[in-house]
Image: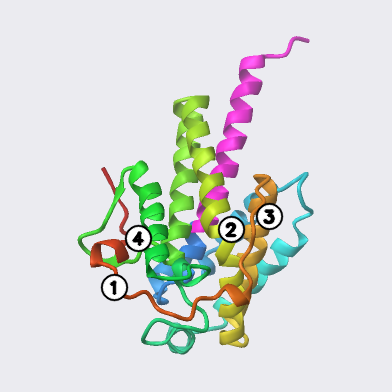
Amino acid sequence: MGVDSTSFSDQQVASGVVNLLARSAMYQILSACFLYPEEENLSILKSPDFQEHAKDLMLCYEGVDDGAGLKRCLNEVQELYGNANIETLQRIYQCVVGHTMSKECPLYETQYGAAHVYQQVHELGDIQGFYKAFGLDISDVEKERCDHVSVELEFIHFLLYKQAYALENHGDEKVQICVDAQKKFLKEHIGKWVPLFAVLFSRKAGEGFYCALSALTKEFLRLEMKLMDIKTEIYKESDLNQEAVAGASDECLSCASSEDFNEE
């Protein structure tokens, strides 16, 4: 019996696309979860589709990890969200984040590791450079700083989605561009500070949904870094910069919100 190599190749592409979209969706879910909680943004957590998504996601790490930790975290997040009401989550979120820039669990990358405002502005420029390289520009509707955790997570969601499209339609060269950008952004940005952010966010929340969300974020990023063979120096609590950004222009401190990237 002959083997249809074209059919086998098509199956590999299809499987690869499914995996990329599952990972992309997880970044998008986490991005939404770290914004002010709104029912419409978090509805996926109560959807029957979430269990199917969880199964697809765990398949992405076969051969890398047994997925037990990820499965436990996903189940806990869904269960705790299902037992909560949106008003309670909004109240808890406001207590955790505060009404001004939090110094206990900052939502912004440049409050981690940057010694002074000039370095912070340089980091912001580097992050914006990633976004602009992929045709993403500042939103005129809803603005958030480009180093906000939700914006950065949304960017990786975008890259994975773009990679899935390239794999299905364009070929290896454009796929590799997306892979290289993901690796670089995870190594130089998300992978360095978000694990510490998750610890601090969990500590401030104390218990419940946001603790479970923080644990899921740490475990998911651990698997992502392992899958992509990325090693980076993760910030320690002593690297937390207690000084808020000051003296930088609005243009430097603003970028598209996680829901309002504009593709040129």
Q: Position of residue 30 (x, y in %)?
A: 51, 64
Q: Earlier in the sequence, mark 4 or mark 2?
A: 2
Label 4 and label 2: CA atoms lie apart by: 21 Å
* 188 or 54: nearer the viewer: 188
Q: What residue type is labelled 1?
A: Gly
Is 231 colored magenta in this rendering?
A: no
Quadrant occupied by the N terminus? top right
Q: Distance between the residues labelled 3 and 1?
A: 38 Å
Check residue 20 for magenta coloring: yes
Looking at the rendered structure, the kind of residue marked 2 is Gly
Q: In which quarter of the image is residue 218?
A: bottom right
Q: Does residue 183 appear in the picture of this structure?
A: yes
Residue position for label 3: 223
Viewer-side residue, 3 vs 89: 89
Q: Earlier in the sequence, mark 3 or mark 1?
A: 3
Q: Is residue 40 above or below residue 159?
A: below
Front-lying residue, 6 or 133: 133
- Mark 3: secondary structure: helix
Inter-mark Cα distance, 4 to 1: 27 Å
**Segment tinted magenta in the rendering:** 1-27
Which residue occupies 67% across, 63% down? Answer: 219
- Establish if 239 lies above or below 49: below
Q: Where is residue 31 in the image (x, y as percent from the top left)?
A: 47, 64
For residue 222, side relative to residue 40 (left or right): right
Name the residue that disc number 4 marks: 259
- Circle nearer the viewer, 4 or 1: 1
Between tags 4 and 2, which lies in front? 2
Task: Please tell me how crowded label 1 is: few (under 14), some (14-19), or many (20+) other residues with Cα within 10 Å.
Answer: few
Query: Marks 2 and 3, Cα distance to the nearest angstrom?
Result: 11 Å
Secondary structure under tag 2 reads helix
Among the 4 quarters of the image, the one containing residue 52 = bottom right
Q: Name the residue under label 2.
A: 191
